[in-house]
Image (cartoon, rainbow, N blue to C red):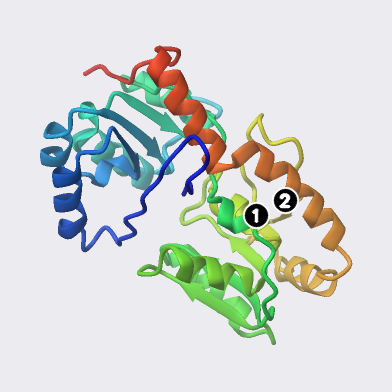
């Protein structure tokens, strides 16, 4: 997430949400002027109620989409929205979500976000660090049955695969990303969605191989290698990306430069805070 700039002082409290009591106690004592919460549904109501400053949330969950309505919505996605609505989000002043494709569905459920801006990326991801690319393919995400079956097929090839289910965050994840030639995106269930890992992979300069995704309007280009894991030869796209890795450097670097100008977390946070102070952004509404 953001780092300090000339106009913004940022203190980081990195933690895994499964072990958060110390961080929440610090927040309650420190009482910053602005609380910006990534994964806002995980902040307890007691923390938010005791906080008198601006409360800004940014949701990175994958919410349902209305595509070819009335299409069937994956129960897993509906469950995520139910958890989101049942948590403490009604205490936030502003709430943003990264995927405008879910706006119609969200509003049909009474969820009116403050906006759907570009996904904010830690500027550290764009730093050029000389590391050995000793990981061919990196996958980060919950290992559903569908993902497990796909990853098993990769393991049968002579490909150095690293798969992270959960438990790593911050610099540990960034270091793995920097060591990877290919960042792979496979959907947990059979659906079309736009998942942040494709941007994170591109930000570190990796080749991104992904199933079909909703490309947002703010993304000027689509450099991703698209696969369909129902096709017998889908792993060939990974092989091609590994073979072309050195030759595709300029293409990947050009996309990184454009992505940084659009998705910089520092730029996003400064812009949102200024707009919130001026009252130039919509308040979050949750209508039961």
Q: Are marks 1 and 2 in contact (CB under 8 Å)?
A: yes
Q: Residue at x 41, y 64 (%)?
A: 169
Picture coordinates of residue 166, whole percent (x, y)? 37, 67
* In the depicted structure, whether residue 176 falls above or below residue 114: below
Q: Secondary structure at mark 2?
A: helix
Q: Residue at x 76, y 66 (%)?
A: 237
Residue lying furthest front in this view? 6
Q: Residue at x 43, y 63 (%)?
A: 170
Which residue is labeled 1 in the image?
A: 203
| 142 left or right, relative to 162 | left
**Residue density around tag 1, few if under 14, some if 14–19, many if 20 or more, within 10 Å:** many
Q: Quadrant of the C terminus?
A: top left
Mark yes or no: residue 119 visible.
no
Label 1 – label 2 distance at C-alpha: 5 Å
Query: Closer to the N terminus: mark 1 or mark 2?
Result: 1
Mark yes or no: residue 216 visible.
yes
Between 6 and 43, the one lying in front of the other is 6
**Which disc number belongs to residue 256?**
2
Q: Residue at x 22, y 44 (%)?
A: 43
| 101 left or right, relative to 245 | left
* In the depicted structure, whether residue 145 falls above or below residue 202: below
């Amino acid at each position: 997430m953001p780092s300090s700039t000339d106009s913004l002082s940022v203190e980081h409290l990195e933690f895994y949400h499964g072990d958060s009591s110390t961080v929440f106690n610090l927040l309650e004592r420190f009482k910053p002027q602005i609380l910006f919460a990534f994964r806002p549904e995980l902040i307890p109501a007691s923390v938010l109620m005791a906080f008198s400053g601006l409360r800004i949330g940014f949701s990175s969950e994958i919410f349902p989409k209305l595509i070819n309505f009335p299409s069937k919505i994956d129960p897993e996605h509906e469950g995520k929205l139910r958890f989101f609505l049942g948590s403490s989000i009604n205490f936030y002043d502003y709430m943003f979500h990264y995927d405008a494709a879910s706006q119609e569905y969200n509003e049909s459920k009474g969820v009116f976000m403050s906006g759907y801006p570009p996904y904010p990326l830690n500027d550290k991801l764009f730093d050029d660090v000389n590391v050995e690319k000793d990981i061919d393919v990196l996958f980060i995400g919950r290992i559903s049955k569908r993902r497990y079956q796909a990853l098993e097929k990769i393991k049968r090839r002579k490909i150095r695969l690293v798969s992270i289910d959960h438990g790593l965050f911050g610099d540990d994840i960034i270091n793995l990303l920097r060591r990877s030639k290919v960042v792979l995106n496979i959907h947990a269930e059979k659906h079309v969605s736009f998942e942040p890992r494709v941007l994170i992979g591109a930000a570190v300069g990796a080749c991104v191989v992904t199933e079909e995704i909703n490309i947002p309007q703010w993304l000027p280009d689509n450099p991703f290698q698209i696969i369909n894991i129902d096709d017998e030869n889908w792993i060939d796209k990974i092989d091609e990306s590994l073979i072309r890795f050195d030759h595709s450097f300029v293409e990947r670097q050009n996309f990184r430069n454009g992505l940084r100008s659009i998705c910089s977390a520092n730029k996003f946070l400064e812009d949102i805070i200024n707009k919130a102070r001026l009252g130039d952004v919509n308040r979050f509404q949750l209508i039961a």
